[in-house]
Image: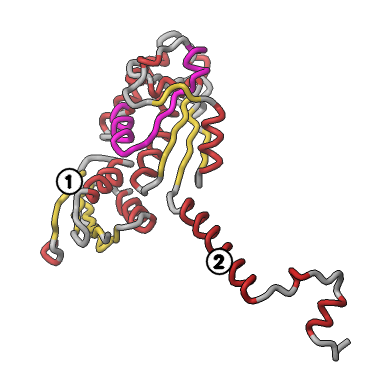
Amino acid sequence: MSTDTPDATADDTGDTTESETPSRAELAARVEELEASLAAVTEDDDQKKMSIIATKGTLDMAYPPLILASTAAAFGYDVTVFHTFWGLDILHEERSKDLKLSSVGNPNMPVPNAVAALPGMDRMTTKMMEKKIADNDTATIEELIETSLDMGVEFQACQMTIELMDYDEEDFYDDVTTGVGAATALQDMADADIQLLV
Amino acid sequence: MSEAYDIAETLDVKGASCPMPVVKTKAAIDDLAAGEILEVLATDSGSMSDIEGWAAGTDGVELVDQQDGADVYTHYVRKTE
């Protein structure tokens, strides 16, 4: 065995076909082909992408998708935020200015659930939060949406839930994409480097 | 303080908090020419880490210096391309 030439070894390992001993020209062609497909792949991957699905419409849960979207845009990412169910309220021009904070079911709130469930409590906790936001110079939801749009973030409003919630396409900020569904979101997620469900 | 750098533009984001210092820095950098330096004045203590991270993760920019002053954090960012 040890005296076998490399060609003979190749013969021993199985059926010999011509492709196992390609010519120089064949190898060169194959390398060229692989280099071309590698170039195509790396070209596509050059652009970083982020896809966020925003499903919540409370004041506290509206912030994370918008902060991450605008920050990712600053990093040069192509960002898509797909809004569905209560997440639609973030893009709703009127409702976005009046998002509420719920005190029920949040054990970090300074009031017990039994008290938090009383009428008017959500209004009170929302006012408290809005005051904190203003005192802290934290950007408002409206500012974050405008900034994100300026930076090229694409906001999408899920068509099925627009109809489910009885909203109108004109209710949303200008430049919000409507007429899109789960397949669009899935495609964005498949192409993205970062995918988040908020 | 700042005379060490040849500053093309100064961005004042004092008072603004996350994510605005980074987002506005990016917008201001876009208006500069390659090689120019942007000075950013911020009061958000998170801006030290955030602008450093942003500069490291973003093509075409380079963090030149950061200064932790008494009340104001000063950042110097160069547009490289």
Q: Are marks 2 and 1 in contact (CB under 8 Å)?
A: no
Q: Badge 2, how many Cα within 10 Å: few under 14, some, many 20+?
A: few
Q: Would you place residue A141 above or below residue A92 in this image? A: below
Q: Would you place residue A138 above or below residue B23 in this image? A: above
> For the point 52% across and 54% down, which residue is it?
A41
In the image, residue B72 lies at what x, y percent?
A: 20, 51
Secondary structure found at label 2? helix
Residue linked to disc 2: A32
Residue A158 is inside the magenta segment: yes
The secondary structure that most of the magenta stretch takes on is helix
Q: Would you place residue A41 above or below residue A158 in this image? A: below
What number is the disc on residue B50? none
Q: Report whether B36 appears left or right of A46.
A: left
> For the point 87% across and 77% down, which residue is it?
A12
Circle 1 chain: B
Q: Residue furthest left?
A: B3
Q: Quadrant of the N terminus of chain A?
A: bottom right
Along the line of sight, the residue nearer the viewer: A3 or A159: A3
Number of numbered callouts drawn: 2
Amino acid carrying mark 1 in the image: Asp
Amino acid carrying mark 2 in the image: Glu
Secondary structure found at label 1? strand
Question: Spatial distance from mark 2 to mark 1, Cα to Cα?
Answer: 52 Å
Along the line of sight, the residue nearer the viewer: A148 or A42: A42
Q: Would you place residue A90 above or below residue A192 in this image? A: above
Residue linked to disc 1: B12
In the image, residue B58 lies at what x, y percent?
A: 36, 54
Chain part drawn in magenta: A142-165
In the image, residue A74 lies at what x, y percent?
A: 33, 46
Disc 2 vs disc 1: which is toward the camera? 2
Q: Are marks 2 and 1 on the same chain?
A: no
